[in-house]
Amino acid sequence: MRTWASGTLIRNTLWMLGGFGFRLGVQFATFVVVARVLKPEAFGVFSGCLAVVSVLVPFATWGTGNILIKHTARTPAVFSAYWGAALLTALLSGLALIAGAVGIGFLLFSPHLALTVMAPIAVADLLGTRCADLASQAFQAQQKLSGTSVIWSAVSLLRLAGAIALWWLPLEKTAALWSFFYMLSGLGSGLFGVFWVRALWGRAHWSLKPLRGQWREGFYFAISLSAQGAYNDIDKTLLLRFGTGDTAGAYAACYRLVDAGFTPIKALLASTYPRFFQEGAKGLGAALQFSRKLLPWSCGYGIVAWVGMAVCAPLFPFILGRDYAMTPAMIPWLAPLLLIRTVHFLAADALTGSGYQGHRSAAQVGVAALNLALNLWWIPRYGWLGAAWSSLVSDGALAVGLWVLARFLRKRHGEAPV
């Protein structure tokens, strides 16, 4: 295990960091092009619709990608069975959820937005990109994170191609047009990922039988990610509904910038995810010990990134354009999330790897409910500032709550302190 830690972990982290770094550059270029071309109002409309779809995204795969990683990391021979089950789940669930997303668009916004903006986003994120995500998890399960990195980079490159088309083509620059290019990029990345996995490891076994008795665990994974999407993104939808498109667009742009700053931590979390299942097989104490080894380095980065993001805030209107003049005021309120999320993700992955995904999911659902309540209370009164406050309070509560929960569970099951 020491060899794995010093060899595979470092190599996988470097692959993921390199891939995330490349992806970050491409995503940032895409973000700047789209933000400048659409202007805040249209960008806010797109972001508001995207936030709704993001809550549904985890149910398109029902946690089967995580189940694939869990079982393949422990027993590699079962890969084809769980890979096929994951793909079939994505196909069946994705199609049903696309219809559901369009229906929600009719209720929340208007028939026009539902069909021209919400529907293409749903096809991209509930079907196309989900297949690409499953393919990346297939490589992750095999501990071949170079492939995971390539797939994520391909997703970003195709979106950049769509952004360039949006800018270059002599068409009216609308949220609907960008949603169409977004859909094409999602479908293209999904096809690329699935066919690459097939070329390396053969055909998938198209059957749901491997998932018998595991749907509850899959639901825990799905509800966890859905809750995460809710407390990360629902504020953008509510800002669009209660405020203006300009404010929602500027706020969404700031959130994208903060998310970009989280890239190195995402690389670390992706490379260590299979290891948490291996450590978790020994007990929650071992998984927590592994988390604590990672905590000083990741928190150190979180603090540096927080300060750096706040210091650089006045530069962002020069990059995004004068229409985003509100971003320097917004960034300092959102930048602390870089540290807070680092803390809660390490506790969360320790719980997942040790078989406590249900407890993690329950905590995240509770925080999502808290976030929704705070947003409904504060956004009508304080606008974007209320949205920022709700994010800080919710993520802070989750960070404290998950570590307290992990400590309680370890003591309840009689494990020695680590």
Image: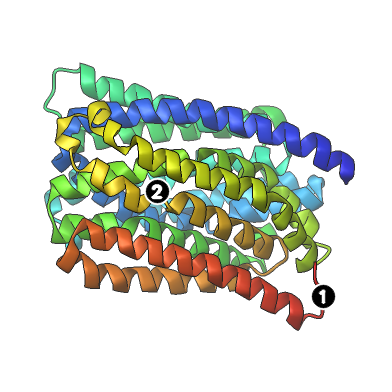
Q: Position of residue 257 (x, y in %)?
A: 37, 39
- Relative placement, left or right, of 299 versus 281 is left
Q: Specify whether residue 128 is in view.
A: no
Residue tagged by mark 1? 415
Give the vertical position of 197 relative to 110 (above or below). Answer: above
- Residue 302 versus residue 308 in the image, above or below: below
The amino acid pointed to by label 1 is Glu
Q: Which disc is residue 106 wearing?
A: none
**Closest to the observer, 368 or 78:** 368
The amino acid type of the residue labelled 2 equals Ala
Position of the C terminus, as image quadrant, is bottom right
Does residue 311 appear left or right of residue 325 in this picture? right
Q: Quadrant of residue 197?
A: top right
Classify mark 2: helix, strand or loop.
Answer: loop
Q: Choose top left, top right, bottom left or bottom right for residue 179.
A: top left
Instruction: Identify the secondary structure beneath mark 1.
Output: loop
Q: Residue at x 27, y 35 (%)?
A: 314
User: On the image, numbered disc 2 is attached to which residue?
Assistant: 335
Horizontal relation, residue 233 to residue 37: left or right = right
Q: CA distance from mark 2 to mark 1?
A: 36 Å
Q: Position of residue 357 (x, y in %)?
A: 62, 67
Q: Can residue 139 be seen in the rendering of this structure?
A: yes
